[in-house]
Image: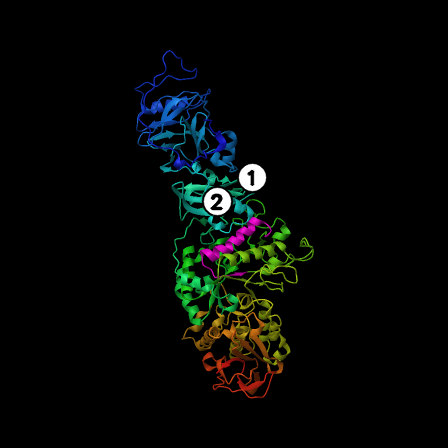
């Protein structure tokens, strides 16, 4: 059989653990043929009484030509099963059947010219400098002319021994951490390495005897940018490979000259752990036997210019607690208990279901709590207030807490500040079991420039755009993703799926969409280049968002995606295959934040009531475009920080008027078409701006605090708003259809009054009347349909228990046949000061 070339790697016929290693039969001494001279280079057979160690050494020596000044290539020790015979210098001994303990045996030689087992100068140089693309073709055990060459690269080792069954072979120390030896064997045996360091000795599998852990299909999908489960193949994964336990490391670094793994298991010296490059995929891989969960690691990358950089794993599923930056080998053992929730969530699309969201910054909601401690408190609190969902500000790992999670370095790792990934799953599970959905802020627009993370990851622009003008995000000093590169799109699309599938997230609120869609976003003329059509649209970002949404909705039933998009981009929530007037297909989101409603309505509320009549249109304009998209009405964290004041503090006047305005505004918000979102602390009228350092001012709800009733009253209102909202389909069933809304009066500016009807699918109405003046209006006539016998008040933001003046309409109100506001009948109401009133058919 023709031997394989030295550099071609392990034999592809079968993995090492399946190659024949049955015990050989006892050795039989073979006599040389009579009267036939031995080959010129042959040695005489060893004497019968030569000790096993010496005889095996002679066999190893005989298998390799020994030039002048050369050294022995290894020392074999037969621990059982007899003494191997000597071998020719020009031919290795053949392997005979093994003895019962699995020790390989030597057999008579064949006519093969032996080679030196030492790593050649070129390979040696590349391994030493971390620039070798195929270390497995050099290191490990390889069939070569003359037998099987064993090579190991173990910096700092004093000695390395090959252990195979009952035989041990001391490899020769070639210097600089290289060890080699040649045994006259026909096949590569099953073996382990015994490595001696100063003061310690360890026996381990050889990482360079294993076949690749990634298949051709995986590499093909990665190359095409279509691997929807990318997290299962890249990163660090504990696994059993070829019957051996260890961890598979793999990373995409196409520009690297070499990649090595450094970690706690090798004292952060990756020199002896070079990874192999898998074809043209740009993926580097190494299976390291014997290590598992909890090990810290990073990738040491040799850049194109030869310099080195040490990087955290972009696909790390667990990280150290910041400011430490290492990745951690992990696997999940969490057993979910939310099957019933997952089955039920897909029954009704989000835009036709009740959806009121409590936005939470987890590290500061109750500072100091872990994920599991939060699971004991947050679900109960949110359920008591009646919210249908929580929205979690980014939980993906980020280095700077002051970014609130919006500058992500670990896109696949929940922040370690509050626990492990399984701990985060426990929190999500607890929320689901309490009947609460989980929306997570997701940040695919940009990433920070930290030198240990994604920026110029392998020495060149990789995740970011290669054009510095396109790469630099002008607002945050960060880098924008290169949405035109298929592997980068794959990284992000798979990340969206990862959170939904692995962590059972029910929705993704996508941050900063506008900054992705426009090439000239926050850029001056000359700082951006038009697209191929001469326009300002970022066509790559459009394609990415369409692909992300289409993929998420296809794979994860019941999940909703929500865009934080602040412009009038056409079709944010239109299906991707439906083209609009602009010529673009829809972006495919399920919902969009209504930033226009938020800005206009808060601007109106900031005015003194006497001036509000001049700004009345700020409260009515949202209905001009209310059905252009599927909207969420957001009062988010962005509106209560950085000098913008808390929600109640935006209101004019004294403390009583501020709270009354806040209550009236919340009543207007919950009745307006669209879903609701309220940031933590605003549900109990926190007066101070939010700070991530100390979170909400929970002390305001302490019964011993003098104004506790004022804050508790607003929180009671929020609870009742959610309770009535969820029980009234007219307030959510037709949020995205004009048939669900009718103005009663939208032009009563002098009275600071708005009145409108909401309808459900059966035509059952709810009447909302909002009064933003600090006076009582008696017998205020409001038009109503003539098919409702009587109306009764179901919510009034001015009742005493909310902290109001308790001006109410306690009795059912019967319509009069007098038409009003374009409707055939009317009712007369008492309008409380600065209050919203809801009425339903009695």
Q: Residue at x 51, y 81 (%)?
A: 839
Left/right of residue 254 with respect to residue 531 in the rendered view: left
Position of residue 651 measured from the top left corner of the image (x, y, whole percent): 55, 75
Residue nearest the viewer, comparing 417 with 210: 210
Position of residue 714 measured from the top left corner of the image (x, y, whole percent): 47, 75
Q: Nearer the viewer, mark 2 or mark 1?
A: 2
**Is 743 located above or below residue 140 in the figure?**
below
**Is 356 located above or below residue 134 in the figure?**
below
Number of the label disc, if any, that sits on residue 549: none
Which residue is labeled 1 in the image?
306
Which residue is labeled 2 in the image?
250
Tell me how far mark 2 sits from mark 1, CA to CA. Answer: 21 Å
- Under circle 2, the secondary element is strand
Q: Residue at x 59, y 47 (%)?
A: 461
Q: Residue at x 50, y 72 (%)?
A: 687
Position of residue 380 measured from the top left corner of the image (x, y, whole percent): 40, 68
Left/right of residue 346 with respect to residue 455 in the rendered view: left
Position of residue 741 measured from the top left corner of the image (x, y, whole percent): 57, 75
Q: State which region is magenta.
A: 483-510
């Amino acid at each position: 059989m023709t031997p394989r070339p030295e550099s071609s790697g392990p034999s592809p016929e079968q993995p090492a653990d399946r190659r024949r290693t049955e015990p050989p039969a006892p050795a039989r001494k073979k006599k040389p043929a009579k009267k036939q001279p031995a080959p010129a280079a042959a040695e005489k057979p060893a004497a019968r009484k030569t000790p096993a160690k010496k005889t095996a050494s002679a066999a190893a020596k005989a298998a390799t030509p020994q030039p002048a000044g050369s050294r022995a290539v290894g020392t074999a020790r037969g621990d059982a099963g007899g003494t191997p015979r000597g071998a020719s210098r020009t031919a290795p001994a053949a392997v005979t059947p093994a003895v019962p303990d699995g020790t390989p045996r030597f057999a008579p030689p064949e006519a093969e010219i032996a080679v030196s087992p030492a790593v050649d100068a070129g390979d040696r140089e590349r391994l030493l400098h971390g620039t070798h693309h195929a270390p497995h073709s050099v290191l490990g055990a390889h069939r070569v002319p003359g037998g099987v060459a064993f090579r190991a690269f173990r910096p700092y080792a004093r000695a390395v021994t090959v252990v195979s069954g009952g035989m041990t072979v001391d490899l020769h120390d070639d210097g600089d951490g290289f060890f080699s030896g040649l045994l006259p064997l026909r096949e590569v045996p099953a073996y382990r390495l015994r490595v001696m360091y100063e003061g310690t000795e360890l026996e381990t599998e050889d990482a360079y005897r294993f076949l690749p852990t990634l298949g051709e299909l995986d590499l093909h999908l990665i190359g095409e940018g279509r691997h929807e489960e990318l997290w299962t193949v890249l990163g660090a994964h504990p696994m059993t490979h070829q019957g051996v336990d260890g961890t598979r490391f793999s990373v995409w670094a196409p520009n690297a000259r070499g990649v090595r793994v450094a970690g706690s298991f090798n004292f952060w010296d990756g020199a002896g752990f070079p990874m192999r490059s898998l074809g043209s995929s740009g993926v580097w891989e190494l299976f390291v036997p014997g290590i598992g969960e909890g090990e810290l690691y990073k990738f040491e990358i040799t850049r194109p210019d030869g310099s080195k950089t040490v990087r955290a794993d972009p696909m790390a599923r667990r990280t150290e607690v910041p400011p430490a930056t290492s990745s951690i080998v992990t696997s999940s053992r969490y057993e979910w208990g939310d099957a019933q929730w997952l089955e039920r969530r897909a029954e009704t699309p989000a835009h036709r279901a009740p959806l009121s969201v409590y936005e939470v910054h987890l590290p500061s909601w109750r500072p100091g709590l872990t994920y599991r401690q939060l699971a004991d408190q947050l679900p109960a609190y949110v359920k008591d207030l009646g919210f249908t969902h929580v929205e979690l500000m980014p939980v993906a790992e980020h280095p700077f807490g002051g970014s609130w999670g919006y500058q992500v370095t670990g896109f696949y790792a929940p922040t370690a500040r509050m626990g492990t990934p399984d701990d985060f799953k426990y929190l999500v599970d607890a929320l689901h079991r309490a009947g609460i959905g989980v929306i997570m802020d997701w940040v695919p627009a940009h990433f920070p420039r930290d030198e240990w993370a994604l920026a110029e990851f392998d020495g060149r622009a990789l995740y970011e755009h290669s054009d510095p003008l396109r790469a630099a995000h002008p607002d945050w000093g960060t880098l924008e993703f290169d949405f035109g590169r298929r592997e980068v799109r794959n990284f992000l699309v798979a990340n969206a799926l990862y959170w939904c599938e692995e962590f059972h997230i029910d929705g993704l609120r996508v941050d900063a969409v506008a900054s992705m869609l426009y090439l000239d976003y926050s850029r001056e003329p000359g700082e951006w280049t038009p697209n191929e059509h001469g326009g300002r649209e970022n066509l790559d970002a459009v394609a990415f968002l369409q692909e992300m949404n289409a993929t998420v909705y296809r794979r994860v039933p019941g999940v909703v995606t929500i865009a934080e998009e602040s412009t009038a981009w056409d079709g944010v929530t239109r299906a991707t295959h439906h083209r609009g007037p602009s010529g673009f297909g829809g972006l495919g989101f399920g919902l969009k934040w209504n930033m226009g409603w938020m800005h206009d309505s808060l601007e109106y509320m900031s005015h003194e009531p006497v001036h509000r009549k001049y700004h009345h249109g700020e409260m009515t304009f949202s209905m001009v475009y209310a059905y252009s998209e599927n909207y969420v009405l957001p009062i988010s964290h962005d509106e209560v920080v950085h000098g913008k004041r808390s929600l109640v503090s935006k209101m004019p006047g004294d403390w009583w008027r501020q709270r009354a305005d806040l209550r009236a505004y919340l009543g207007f918000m919950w009745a307006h078409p669209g879903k609701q979102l309220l940031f933590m602390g605003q549900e109990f009228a926190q007066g101070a701006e939010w700070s991530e350092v100390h979170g909400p001012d929970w002390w305001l709800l302490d019964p011993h605090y003098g104004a506790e009733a004022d804050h508790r009253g607003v929180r009671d209102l929020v609870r009742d708003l959610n309770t009535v909202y969820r029980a009234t389909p007219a307030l959510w069933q037709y949020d995205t259809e004009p048939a669900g809304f009718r103005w009663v009066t939208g032009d009563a500016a002098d009275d600071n009054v708005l009145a409108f009807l909401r309808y459900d699918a059966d035509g059952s109405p709810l009447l909302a009347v909002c009064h933003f003046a600090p006076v009582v209006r008696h017998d205020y006539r409001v038009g109503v349909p003539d098919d409702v016998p009587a109306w009764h008040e179901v919510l009034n933001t001015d009742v005493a228990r909310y902290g109001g003046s308790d001006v109410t309409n306690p009795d059912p109100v019967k319509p009069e046949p007098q038409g009003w506001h374009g409707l055939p009948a009317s009712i007369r109401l008492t309008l409380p000061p600065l209050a919203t009133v809801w009425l339903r058919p009695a």
